Amino acid sequence: MLEFDDIQHMLLTRAPAITGRYEFLSFGTPAQGRAWLRRVLPIVQSAAAATASVDSEKRWVSVAFTWNGLRAVGVDEGSLASFPAEFREGMVARARMLGDTGANHPDNWVGGLASPDLHAIAILFARSEEERGRCVKEHDAFLAETHGVKVLSSLDLEATPPFDHAHDHFGYRDRLTQPEIEGTGVEPSPGSGAPLKAGEFILGYDDELGPVHGLPKPDVLSRNGSFMAYRRLQEHVGAFRDFLRQNAATPDEQELLAAKLMGRWRSGAPLVLAPDRDDPALAADRQRNNNFDYGKMDPLGYAIPLGAHIRRMNPRDTAANINRRRMLRRGATYGPPLADASPEDGRERGVAAFVLCASLIRQFEFAQNVWINDKDFHELGNERDPIIGTQDGTFEFKIPKRPIRRKITGLPAFTTVRGGAYFFLPGLRALRWISELGL
Amino acid sequence: MADRQNDAAARIKAAAKEGDWTQPRAMAIPKEGYFELEKGRYGPIFPKTPANYGFTIIAKIKPGREEAVRAHGMTLQTAVDGKPDCLETLKLHYLRWQVFPIEGALYFMYQGIIDTDFDKYTEDAVMIFTSLGVDTVFTNLEGFPEDWKTNPEAFIKFVREHHHPSFVEYGEYPFVSAVEIKKALRIKQSLSEMLDSMQ
């Protein structure tokens, strides 16, 4: 039985927010860090509380720590050593393996995210801009009273219009494929597979292999927690549109090329089910928009190219062990939208997202290292994920087509990693336990 | 010597990038098993050689377990007979299992030639071997973790610790993947069928 009243809301629910803010924090002394946590703790909601109040609530708050942050609030060395090596090392130390090289290298990250002084993140999702403003003011006020807690940086989130469906700055509909967790009562949409064991995402429960060993100690700290990989991905909308114009003659062909890169039309309709033209009704229909496979329906990639983004992020029936690789995704877009007819304005916009999982090395790092950045994925030879892979102009993208495939060489980077970090998102009891250390 | 080795390695690396299979090649490899340390998820990444990627796991067999180890040969054969594509994910060319004596003790050697680096699909290998029942061959080896069934990380650590990298590898048709070889053979077969149909 899942402890909905202990699991932080963002693991199991999605707040109906259109704005928000991430604040990246650094603590002076452990006592100062814990004093901050005690102040913020009452407004961190559980999944149960967030579900009960979803219609009336205006803002949702989550708190998570880096490994350095757990030490900074006074967690003992024995407990710190019990966390997995990849979390202890942090995202910066794992950069090369993750593909964070060149422009994506941590040396180029912003907001102090590559610094060992990054200790915690406070995540705010808000129903309106007004509510965000009120919350930021409130947080500023108690930061002024809580000495020794520094905001390294912050990032305001803005949903991009139109607001009737979630999408990124490139215009691709988002949130179409999410694994569902056994015990939440949510039925997966057709084609999404069976619900997965909670232990794939939440510590303290059985995972797909059964009971899980070697969890961080003590149990009160790890139970109902989850690991989170944060990625701030700038989207180069101007470069993306230029690429479509340069590589496709008509607006219809540009749309098709955009769809080939993603594997879905920007509406969200999957190319396996709508190979030749967009089908917005299919895109919006949860009963149909995920109901496809690759092995039987598109083995050679004539609909969705073998290297397309969605084929990499969820190879469905064409990968072994897939239930041990799934991840939950949360987050939002940031920065101003770029109007359709506008040239690139040089302002930063993108996606600031969290990948939540029980094992960073087995889930997030595998996806990043193998699915996204392995140039030999599906025997492609010289390709990386065309949307979020590390691109430096030397890779290609092949579009299977009869009689002869199309090969686009010198694919530019449409995204750049501007920052990232590994966090641990504790359950509420664990947050209380941390806040009371030393009392 | 080290410079010469690095130069030669750079040339071979360039040939690997080009996928130049026309010229047989050999590659001498430093003692560590790699030219420069590049970390994968679980440890150093061993380079692609003319014989592609691979691993060699050597471990001591527990006394009296030789027959149990050998019996797993048939387990693997039965598994592949029953489901010929059961190992597909591992991107294998060849597997070789051997038992040999050293100073009165018996050792098990497990070699694989694969098309992807050793680090990438480690967990999948563990999972597939578990599902085929082949994993239990390891329980006959000294040092294998007792809790391997519930502790895949310990399984991975054992494999890593018992891997002995090559110091030279040779390829008669270097860098070619199993998929490419099968594609070429399929084309040859299709061509002969086409020629037959024109008789």
Image (spheres, rainbow, N blue to C red):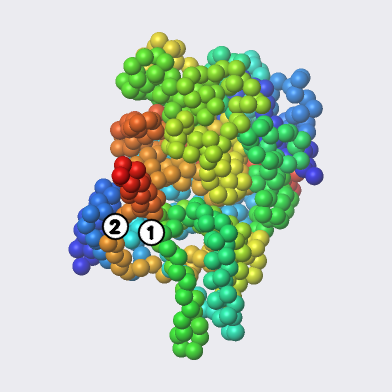
Circles 2 and 1 on the same chain = yes
Residue type at the position of mark 2: Pro
**Residue holding disc 1:** B53
Q: Residue at x 54, y 61 (%)?
A: B80
**Residue holding disc 2:** B174
Q: Residue A402: x, y in percent?
A: 37, 30
Residue at the extreme bottom: B104
Q: Residue at x 30, y 37 (%)?
A: A394
Cα–Cα span, label 2 and label 1: 11 Å
Residue at the extreme front: B199
Q: Residue at x 37, y 17 (%)?
A: A344
Residue type at the position of mark 1: Tyr
Q: Is residue A56 above or below residue A386?
A: above
Q: Is residue B79 visible?
A: yes
What is the chain letter for disc 2?
B
Q: Residue at x 66, y 60 (%)?
A: B150
Element class at badge 1: strand
Element class at badge 2: loop
Q: Is residue A435 above or below residue B75?
A: above
